[in-house]
Structures are given as structure tokens and as C-alpha cells.
Image (spheres, rainbow, N blue to C red):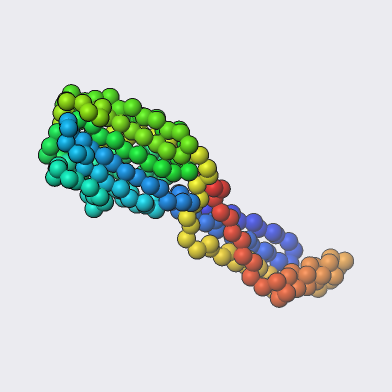
Amino acid sequence: MNKARLALLGATGVATLLVTTSVAGAATFDSTVDITTELGVRDLQARTFANTATVGAGAELDLTHEVANPDVLTGAVEVDIDPDSDSITVTWAERDDCYSYIEVTISSAEIGSVTLASDALFSESPPSVVVDSADGVVTMLWGTKGDTGCYDGTIGNSAVFSFTNAEPTSTTDGPEPTVPVTLVLSPELPSTGSGSSQSTSLMVALLAIVLGAGAVRLTRRSASR
């Protein structure tokens, strides 16, 4: 917690100002994202997952979001979008069958360009991933649809991508803190001399501020990215 202290020292009083700034919370998206994954092997029909998600803690797409699996394939990846690190992680969450291709599609107005940071998704004869991002749609494709190859992976293996923000993301903060202004006035007043009236005027002015304005609330939010 950052504190700034302002001390005003004079012959008759002391004023102390304490400012406590708010602590920035986790970044988040202003809108939901649509995510689909498609996993296919040779001429079998693909296993498909889909979800419209609010970006937050944990994976935005996981095993619970299956929408089609006509040939009863086993194996799936989960997708996690992290707005704090501006990253997308695709991780094997279930794996039994080998796959000819995996395609991940993310639709979001807040994701700009996407680049590959690291790729260890496939552990054996890994196909290169092809990334395309345009008009708010990101596609990541390992392998080729219709390919006769079949590639293995291991649960926990992942690929990580970094992205730029197409639009500013907001920051979620807790309640904004209130900051009291405390005035501590010396009880002693000069009884003689020309400075007496000036000191008395200063104290009257300070007391008027306290009685008239009450507590002062100062807040400062972290700038949105």
C-alpha cells in the first residue's frame, strides 16, 4: 500500500494528509469470447467442443464443452486466455487416440495479432502450427484436415501464444478506498506579538475547512490498458 504524507508545519498547527491508492485488480475483457476446438483423425468425423465464455480465471474451454463426437474419439485440449499476460494456452486435457489435426478458433473483438511463443503440444512427429488472425477471428491449426498421419501428445503438453489487444481491456478493482484528511492543531497560541492575529486567523481557517468540508475522499485508479 502506497502512502503519501504531506505535513504542513507552522507556529500554531500541523496538518497531515494521508493518501492511500487503490490496488489494481486483474485485467479482463469487456466482452465474451467464442471458442471452438476440432480434433480429427484420418477419415473419421471430428470431435468438437465449443463455448461462449467470459474471460477470467481458469480455462475458457474444457472437457465439459463437448458438442459433437459421432465416432466416439477420445482426446481433447483445453484453451485458457490470460488477459494479464496477454497469452493463450492450448493444453492436452485428455488423450488416448492420436490425431491428424487439431484446429482452435477464437472469436473476440479484443484480440488483435497472435504469435506463437512456444509449442510442445505434440510430443511425437509434431506438425507445425499455422496461426491466422484477422477481423477478430484467430485460427490455430496443427496438421492438415484429411491427412492420413496420426500424431501423439501427452496430457499436460501445451502450446503458448501471445496476443496484442485490439481494444483496451478494463481493470477490475475492489471497492475504492476512502482517505481521511487528519488535522492536528497545536493547543498553544502566541499570546503577544504581531504574529498572534495571523496565527489565530490560520487556525480559524483550518477549523472552517474541517467543519465545513468534513472528510475528504481521494481515489486513484490504475490506468486502463
Q: Residue at x 46, y 39 (%)?
A: 136
- How far across and how far down the image is residue 147, in percent? 21, 26
Q: From the viewer's perspective, is residue 148 above or below residue 68? A: above
Is 79 placed left or right of 20 in the picture? Answer: left
**Residue at x-position 80% and y-position 71%:** 200
Extreme residue in the bottom direction: 211
45 w.r.t. 2: above or below: above
Q: Is residue 115 left or right of residue 207?
A: left
Camera sees residue 33: yes
Q: Nearer the viewer, residue 216 or 93?
A: 93
Position in image of residue 76 (x %, y %): 21, 42
Expressed as whole percent of the image width and height from the top left, the position of residue 43 reads 17, 32
Which of the two residues, 70 or 66, is positioned nearer the viewer here?
70
Q: Position of residue 110 (x, y in %)?
A: 48, 43
Q: Nearer the viewer, residue 71 or 198?
A: 71
Res 160 quadrant in image: top left
Residue visible at 36% across and 51% down? 52
Q: Nearer the viewer, residue 28 or 37?
A: 37
Q: Is residue 53 above or below residue 197?
A: above
Identified at 56% across, 48% down, the residue is 223
Residue 199 placement, left or right of 128:
right
Q: Is residue 168 left or right of residue 197?
A: left
- Residue 120 appearing in the image: no
**Name of the residue lying farthest toward the right:** 194
